[in-house]
Image: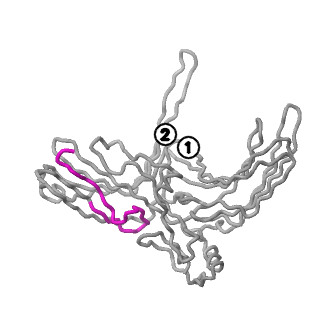
Amino acid sequence: MGKLKAFYIELENPQGVYFEGQLLNGKLIVELDAEMKMREIRLTLKGLAYVHWTETHSTGSGRNRRTTTRHYSATENYFHHIVPVYGRGVGTGDDNRLPPGQHVFPFSFILPGNLPSSFEGGVGYVRYTVKGTIDKPWKFDHNTKRPFTMVSSLDLNTQPNAACETHNRQDKFLCCLCCKSGPITGMIRLDRCGFVPGEAIQFNAEIQNMTSRVCGIHVKLTMNTIFHATTKSKTTVKEVARVTHPDLQPGETETWSGDRLVLPPLPPSFLVGCRIIDIDYYLELIVDPSGPALDLHVPLYVIIGTIPLRAVVQQYQTQYGISGPGPSQLPPSGPEPTAPPMGGASADMNLPPPSYNECVFGKSNIKEEDDSEYTQGQMDFAPAYTYYDWSNQSQFK
């Protein structure tokens, strides 16, 4: 790195997770082995959503057949602030010489309201970064990047269907040549639709196998993401959790009562505030008959929020014998220094270790077109979503 010994960004909140309206405090640190000539040192704070994918289309036939690759994309900007911290931008001209040693440049930025949650989804993302640049005359600039996670509040108490019971039932007949088997019947039921990460979705299910086939059974939670480009949309489906039961033999019926699927850290439903990416969640009962046949799918729509239903919090308070505020006395939602607002619960959401988020989503490389070999920093990133620790009884006191 020559004269540049170290160039990095430290955030005051080491977890790097923020909520709407919070203060983003940090330091840009430069360590030099020798004096360095530069125009300026500046910070770029950026929040944006971006969608891009390609599709191959063919036209004509024979010798006239042509194949073209079409690009579909869209961008949504939330903020883009450039803040000079040394040199030209602070009125010292183009010829600046930073002496050897460590130099610390503090910064502070108030995050706007109504920002969508961070999201990395392959063909699209919502991404927030702080970038430091050493602008050098007639030479390559040095850059360092630090992504951070933004978590937008989704209060389940404001969602009309979050507390409502829901169920679904589907039948499927299997055909083999001219014969038609008896049906496979699946039913799944929830006592409510709204949950927060860390909660266990408790469900009841019943499966009846009137075929001659052995059927595999599982219940899974899927995240359905719709990416909207300017002229087209694209949907991806990702499984994020699963519960499996033993195979169901021909002629048998199985009933599941109170089975649990614990929600991992997840971005909230809808990705509120973003117009080019939508997120929905479905809990699905899947019955997989052996041999050549399509699976039976029995889906239920669920809402994943960041603020739990008041009735659920009060249920836990009652269960653990803890006296808590009544519905009209619950504190209003609002940003807190190190945890998201609970909007009616006296408990805190926790942030699980980064590896927990990475095992669900994996890391994304956040290198952009304007990054080069002279760009350093945290280039692999997985958003750190919140996780409610319901096993910690002390949080209800």
In the displayed structure image, the side of residue 85 where residue 327 appears, left or right = right
Callout 1: 10 Å neighbours few (<14), some, many (20+)? some
Query: Residue 216: x and y, percent?
Result: 75, 46
Farthest-out residue, top: 63
> x, y percentage for residue 150?
44, 60
Whole-number angstrom distance, CA of label 1 to CA of label 2 = 9 Å
Looking at the rendered structure, the secondary structure element under dot 2 is strand
Viewer-proximal residue, 111 or 290? 290
Residue highlighted by disc 1: 234
Q: Residue at x 85, y 50 (%)?
A: 252
51 up-or-down from 199: above or below: above
Q: Which amino acid is tagged 2?
A: Trp
* Residue ranking furthest to the front: 246
Magenta segment, which residues?
A: 1-27
Q: Position of residue 274 (x, y in %)?
A: 48, 56
Q: Is residue 6 magenta?
A: yes
Categorize mark 2 by other alpha carbons within 10 Å: few (<14), some (14-19), many (20+): some
Q: Are marks 1 and 2 in contact (CB under 8 Å)?
A: yes
Q: Is residue 7 left or right of residue 50?
A: left
Picture quarter with the C terminus: bottom right
Say left or right for 25 vs 100: right
Q: Identify the mark nearer the N-term, 1 or 2.
A: 2
Q: Please give the name of the residue rendered at 53% of the width and 64% of the height, measured from the top-left corner.
A: 387
Colour scheme shown:
one colour
Residue matched to label 2: 53
